[in-house]
Amino acid sequence: MALDIRIAGRYRLGRKIGGGSFGDIYLGTNIQTGEEVAIKLESIKTKHPQLLYESKLYKILQGGVGIPNVRWYGVEGDYNVMVIDLLGPSLEDLFNFCNRKFSLKTVLMLADQLLSRVEFVHARSFIHRDIKPDNFLMGLGKKANQVHIIDFGLAKKYRDPKSHIHIPYRENKNLTGTARYASINTHLGIEQSRRDDMESLGYVLMYFLRGSLPWQGLKAATKRQKYEKISEKKMSTPIELLTKGYPLEFTTYFQYCRSLRFDDKPDYSYLRKVFRDLFAREGYHWDYVFDWTVLKHVHNQNLQRQVNPRPEGAGQEQQQQQPGAERAGVAAAGGAAIGAGDAAAAGESSRRRLLLQTSQGQYGATRY
């Protein structure tokens, strides 16, 4: 890319920060305000253009909590271009940052928001069809604790928005989405509906708790054979085995989702209550201190010690006076996104050291 490329006359194109299901994502800057944005580019020569469709879908969903705002869509040179809110790292990025395990507390705080995001998309008459950790991103700044849902390239209208007449039941459909998180009915070639997004979300939650799913790492000669192996393993794994060692509420979640008929509306409030009741029973506090919040705080503490090493014996009185201060600092930190928003305090080099150990760009914005 040449230097100083302008988009819509008001955005400057910066460095590449990731790649989506199609096209590439760049960091952009509003020339007038200095605000940073994400700019998604798709070649106009692509065989199956999706960016226009996705931008229209974002417009339909606009205004919802955790829905990124599209600033501009149009054509610039040889590219279809979408300018959208810049977000923080994905849940997959954060999962890797936390050594590929989330605590029950973090999973339950996430589950509440994830259920609400999926419910909102469904309320607007669409199903996502690619529910996975990569497609949920934390916000930045004041929205650092807010989960955002992205990547609507595979989304589909499941009912008429006015009459609410549901699409017909069909079979012999090809697998759409990501095999690891696909519902059993999707593997069986059944047309997807709301219940399939819900089942996929259940697999995401168990992935976070367990660290992996039983059907990961299966080897096969072709993609088709791999999908078949994943399908067989998924169908032969009882819910009780998948959720073994974890609270019964996760078994309840899967039993409920798999009991739904094709055109049933899921009871999102019931599922949220199941997890909220478990959260309360465990004695957790809804303080938005996620696993990565604690790790980030520890990183910051270590950085400060490296920059300002404490002389021997200094500050012992302070430490004795405030035994809970470090934990309080974590709570005060909220859940600020890792690797973003710390630039002013720590400088660019320090910020880089706080980044997730991935190669997916400074903001963890791997997909939009």
Image: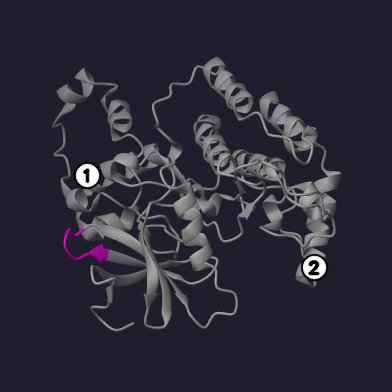
Q: Is residue 298 magenta?
A: no
Q: Amino acid at mark 2?
A: Arg
Residue 197: % across, % down: 66, 45
> From where the camera sits, is residue 33 visible?
yes
The overriding secondary structure of the stretch rendered in magenta is loop
Label 1's element?
A: helix
Q: CA distance from mark 2 to mark 1?
A: 52 Å
**Residue ID at (35%, 46%):** 337
Residue 144: % across, % down: 35, 42
**Residue ID at (54%, 30%):** 108
Q: Give the magenta range.
A: 29-34
Residue 246: % across, % down: 67, 29
Camera-near label (2 vs 1) is 2
Q: Nearer the viewer, residue 172 or 244?
A: 172
Q: Amino acid at mark 1?
A: Arg
**Residue ID at (78%, 49%):** 168
Q: Work out whether 168 lies above or below 2.
A: above
**In the figure, is residue 294 to the left or right of 114?**
left
Q: Quadrant of the N terminus?
A: bottom left
Q: Nearer the viewer, residue 154 or 114?
A: 154
Where on the picture, by quarter, is residue 27? bottom left
* Residue holding disc 1: 305
Q: Work out whether 149 lies above or below 19.
A: above
Q: Which sits earlier in the primary sequence, circle 2 or circle 1?
A: 2
* Residue holding disc 2: 224
